[in-house]
C-alpha cells in the first residue's frame, strides 16, 4: 500500500505537458488584466491617485493641483521621523515624485490602485526630509480615503498642512 501511495505521489510530481492557454501559461500582465476586468483589483490606469493613505504611523496625502498633484508625507518612528511636501505627476501606475525644497529628491513611485509604493532606494538627497536614520525609501501606504478634503487636512508634527493651503 505504501509503495502504491509513493508511486502516485511521484507521478503527481513528474512533469506533464499542460494544455495551452491555461492560467499557468499566461504572463502576469494577463493575470492582472483579468483581475482588473473582474473587479478584484482596481485599474491604476483609470484610477485617480488623490486621497489620504496610511500604514501604521506613516501618512501620505495626494491632492489635485492643476495638471499635477500636491503630495505630503509623514513617516514617524518615534524620535526619528520624515516629513515634507512636494509634487507628483501620474502616468498610469507610474508616479513621478519631486520634493522641490530638497534639490535632487525626485524619483518614480508606483500606484497600485489603492496603494502607493516608494522604491527601496531613493536619491541620497531625500535624506534631508528625515531625522536620524529614518527614511522614506520603501514607504508603502494603503488608501484610507479618496476624499480630497480629508487628504488636505494632513498635518506634520509641527501642525503645518502638507497638502492643503498654498
Image: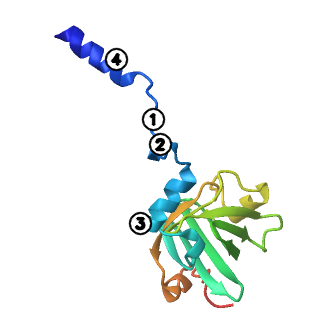
Q: Of callouts 1 and 2, which one flags the residue occurring earlier in the amino acid sequence?
A: 1
Marks 4 & 3, CB-CB < 8 Å contact: no
For disc 3, the neighbor class at 10 Å (few under 14, some 14 to 19, many from 20) is few
Separation of residues labelled 2 and 4 (CA atoms): 21 Å
Looking at the rendered structure, the secondary structure element under dot 3 is helix
Tag 3 residue: 38
Marks 1 & 2, CB-CB < 8 Å contact: yes
The label on residue 24 is 2
The label on residue 10 is 4
43 or 139: nearer the eye? 43
Quarter the C terminus occupies: bottom right
77 or 140: nearer the eye? 140
Separation of residues labelled 4 and 3 (CA atoms): 36 Å
Locate residue 116, reporting x and y percent: 56, 65
Quarter the N terminus occupies: top left
User: Would you place residue 14 above or below residue 69 in this image?
Assistant: above
Marks 2 & 4, CB-CB < 8 Å contact: no
- Which of the 4 image quarters holds residue 85? bottom right
Separation of residues labelled 1 and 2 (CA atoms): 9 Å
Looking at the rendered structure, the secondary structure element under dot 2 is helix
Separation of residues labelled 3 and 1 (CA atoms): 25 Å
Tag 1 residue: 18
Q: Is residue 13 visible?
A: yes
Q: Of callouts 4 and 3, which one flags the residue occurring earlier in the amino acid sequence?
A: 4
For image coordinates 54% across by 50% down, the residue present is 28
For disc 1, the neighbor class at 10 Å (few under 14, some 14 to 19, many from 20) is few
Q: Nearer the viewer, mark 3 or mark 1?
A: 1
For disc 4, the neighbor class at 10 Å (few under 14, some 14 to 19, many from 20) is few
Amino acid at each position: 500500500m505504501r509503495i502504491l501511495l509513493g508511486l502516485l505521489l511521484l507521478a503527481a510530481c513528474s512533469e506533464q505537458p499542460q494544455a495551452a492557454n491555461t492560467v499557468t501559461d499566461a504572463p502576469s500582465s494577463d493575470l492582472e488584466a483579468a483581475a482588473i476586468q473582474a473587479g478584484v483589483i482596481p485599474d491604476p490606469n483609470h484610477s485617480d491617485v488623490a486621497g489620504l493613505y496610511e500604514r501604521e504611523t506613516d501618512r501620505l496625502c495626494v491632492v489635485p493641483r492643476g495638471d499635477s498633484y500636491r503630495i505630503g508625507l509623514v513617516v514617524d518612528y518615534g524620535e526619528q521621523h520624515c516629513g515634507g511636501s512636494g509634487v507628483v505627476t501620474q502616468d498610469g501606475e507610474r508616479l513621478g515624485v519631486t520634493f522641490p525644497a530638497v534639490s535632487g529628491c525626485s524619483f518614480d513611485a508606483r500606484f497600485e490602485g489603492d496603494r502607493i509604493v516608494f522604491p527601496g532606494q531613493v536619491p541620497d538627497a531625500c535624506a534631508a526630509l528625515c531625522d536620524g536614520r529614518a527614511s522614506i525609501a520603501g514607504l508603502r501606504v494603503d488608501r484610507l480615503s479618496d476624499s480630497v478634503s480629508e487628504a488636505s487636512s494632513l498635518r506634520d508634527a509641527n501642525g503645518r498642512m502638507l497638502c492643503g493651503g498654498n
